Image: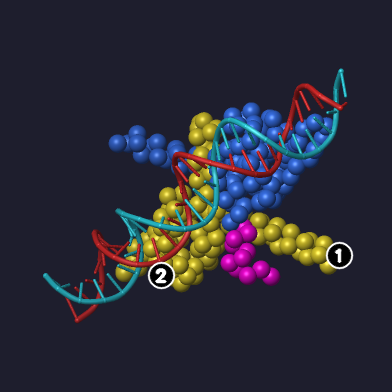
Chain colours: A yellow, B blue, C cyan, D red
Amino acid sequence: MLQRKQYMAAQAQIFKALGHPSRLLMVDALRNGEQCVCDLRQLVGDDISTVSKHLAVLRQAGIVEQDKRGTNIYYRLSLPCLDNFLSCTRALLENRLVSELSILREE
Amino acid sequence: MLQRKQYMAAQAQIFKALGHPSRLLMVDALRNGEQCVCDLRQLVGDDISTVSKHLAVLRQAGIVEQDKRGTNIYYRLSLPCLDNFLSCTRALLENRLVSELSILREE
DNA sequence: TTCCTTTTTGGCTGAATAGCCAAGCTACCG
DNA sequence: CGGTAGCTTGGCTATTCAGCCAAAAAGGAA
């Protein structure tokens, strides 16, 4: 069994990798199936080298896997639990927003 | 409804906050119930000011809530989905470790 | 082979983060 | 009232990260 601190560092790496808007956007898009780097570049709108580095971070954290086919490289999710958690936090954030709006309306 | 990029930034803040070993350790500990800052300081072993700043990050991300009682401040989790996700990624990491060990053994 | 196309890597600068010490704040206690 | 305990905030430095450009791989096409 892992030491608690070591384990936390490993698990924190996953969260850290997801803790950037562009990376999270790509991961979210990959929930609908694999995409090539060029698609993902289009999605986030940054320089291709920036996108590539973001993908390297996600790869190293074990969140995505790559697959070279023909002239392109396709990425797909490799973290099964993620889907649930994203749905859950999305719902939570939307609820928070709604209640903040209600508070504003009452003032 | 939120714009996709805006939404991703908000959600990424949650992941970013969890993406540090000390913060994740504290969050993990809070799954077993509330703790005062002094307990959490003991747990991570850093300077109390460092711990306090980590807790501020978690608060701003909406992951924990605080509750002043007597002379102490108690923190508790406020993100229901987190528990599942932590269990799931923990299991995944342990499986990965096991298979890496098997690979090593075969060499 | 040489030329493209797609992706990664190197290198750089500016921005953000971690963590320590010191100072401030807020109650409770005497 | 002053003193103390528990926590937060300010300020500083060292480290890490983001994102751009340029250059290098890798592989298909001509």
**C-alpha separation, residue under disc 2 versus residue under disc 1:** 47 Å
Which x, y percent locates residue A107?
Answer: 86, 64
The overriding secondary structure of the stretch rendered in magenta is helix
Decide which of A6, B81 is in the foreground and name it: A6
Decide which of A63, A81 is in the foreground and name it: A63
Q: Is residue B31 above or below residue B61?
A: above
Name the chain under label 1: A
Is B8 included in the stretch rendered in magenta?
yes
Q: Quadrant of the C terminus of chain B?
A: top left
B91 sits to left or right of B26: left
Residue at horizontal 59 percent and vertical 29 percent from the top = B45
Q: Is residue A92 above or below residue B80?
A: below
Q: Quadrant of the N terminus of chain B?
A: bottom right
Decide which of B74, B103 is in the foreground and name it: B74
Q: Would you name the residue on which mark 2 appears?
A: A38
Is B71 included in the stretch rendered in magenta?
no
Q: Would you name the residue on which mark 1 appears?
A: A107
Which x, y percent locates residue B77?
Answer: 71, 43
The magenta stretch is B1-11
Q: Indicate the quadrant where residue A8 lies.
A: top right
Asked if badges 2 and 1 are on one and the same chain, I answer yes
Which x, y percent locates residue A97?
Answer: 73, 62
Q: Indicate the quadrant where residue A46 lies.
A: bottom left
Which x, y percent locates residue A101?
Answer: 78, 65
Q: Is residue A62 visible?
A: no
